[in-house]
Image: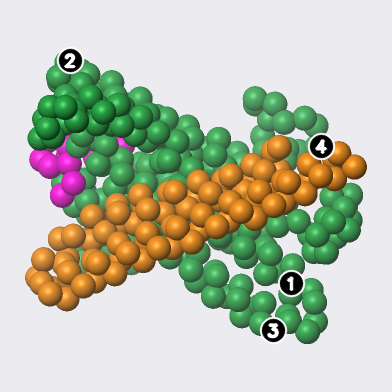
Chain colours: A orange, B green
Amino acid sequence: MEGDIAQMGQFIGAGLASVGMGGAAVGVGNVAGNYLSGALRNPSAAASQTATLFIGIAFAEALGIFSFLVALLLMFAV
Amino acid sequence: MATEAQGAEEGGLVFHPMDQFIVKPLFGMGEVGAFTITNVTLWMALTVVCIILLLVMGTSRRAIVPSRSQSIAEMMYGFVYKMVEDVTGKDGVKYFPYIMTLFMFILVSNFLGLLPMAFTTTSHIAVTGVLAMMVFLAVTILGFVKNGIGFLGLFWVSSAPLALRPILALIEVISYFVRPVSHSIRLAGNMMAGHAVIKVFAAFAAIAAISPLSILAITAMYGLEILVSGIQAYVFAILTCVYLKDALHPAH
């Protein structure tokens, strides 16, 4: 019984951790959207900023990956 | 077989999506020790062989009109060189071989991992953790060697108001030490998540009613994974460049 409740908590926690994906989606969308709107206003400056775009996406995405990691830890390591 | 049957009972899937990441000894069924030759060893060795084939064999003829393999090798070299030069500046170019090595190793092992039945070495935090830790140590040591105690100026944001600076310094120190963690987990997590999603859809393909849909989804995910493999190698390399720039020019 106690193990069942612990396992239930594990599954609920892993599911809740997946909510973090939404945050990463908002972040990455924000970065890419703002890049695009800036790039359309000044297309000549766009090419030099693609590296910054990818760095921004990588930082925003890392936090989503952390939530994935929390879900994985709850499912397999706890 | 035992794990497959158990997985089918528990999740209703034919096989467990995480089974593909199990490290197995290549010969026999013994324990995995420090020097056991495992599937990780095999695929890492294949990665190195592929890089050598591409870069050494590709540029061995050195024709004026490049062959296909030579132009691929030259494009790789030029791409990474330009990236290092753009992000780190002129004085970062002498660390180009290290970044080229990192980029090629991650790129080729990501792509090899996409082959059916292959093992993705970069999906293991043990592998990416070592790569990221090497970058972290190298950058920290380099920063102190190049700038002496002035490297600590990286944490002292001189453009902020004086009252805010200690708080900002604390945040900067924390974010500095989280670097190897996020650097390694970003790569491993991306690779692991993509491959696990493909396997989940592959397990759905066993159900006749939705198998065409899931095969379509696998194809789409596979295309996305090719994109992600390239982008993650690029991101790893460019973040290394950014950290290197911080070490060479720590002033804010």
Q: Is residue B10 visible?
A: yes
> Callout 1: residue from which chain?
B
* Mark 4, secondary structure of its residue: loop
* Mark 1, secondary structure of its residue: helix
In primary-sequence order, the first of circles 4 and 2 is 4
Determine the CA span between mark 2 and mark 3. Answer: 62 Å
Between disc 1 and disc 4, the foreground one is 1
Mark number displayed over residue B204:
1
**Magenta stretch, main secondary structure class:** helix
In primary-sequence order, the first of circles 1 and 4 is 4
Determine the CA span between mark 3 and mark 4. Answer: 37 Å
Q: Residue tagged by mark 4?
A: B29
Determine the residue positioned at 62% across, 65% down. B198
Q: Nearer the viewer, residue A20 or A5?
A: A5
Q: Does residue B151 sit above or below B209 in this rendering?
A: above
Residue B99 in magenta?
yes
Could you say where residue A16 lies in the image, as x and y percent from the top left? 61, 53
Between disc 2 and disc 3, the foreground one is 2
Mark 1 neighbour density, 10 Å: few (under 14) some (14–19) many (20 or more): many
Kindly identify the amino acid type of the residue bearing the numbered disc 1. Phe
Circles 2 and 3 in contact, beta carbons < 8 Å: no
Residue interval drawn in magenta: B86-100
Q: Quadrant of residue B218?
A: bottom right
Q: Quadrant of residue B179?
A: top left
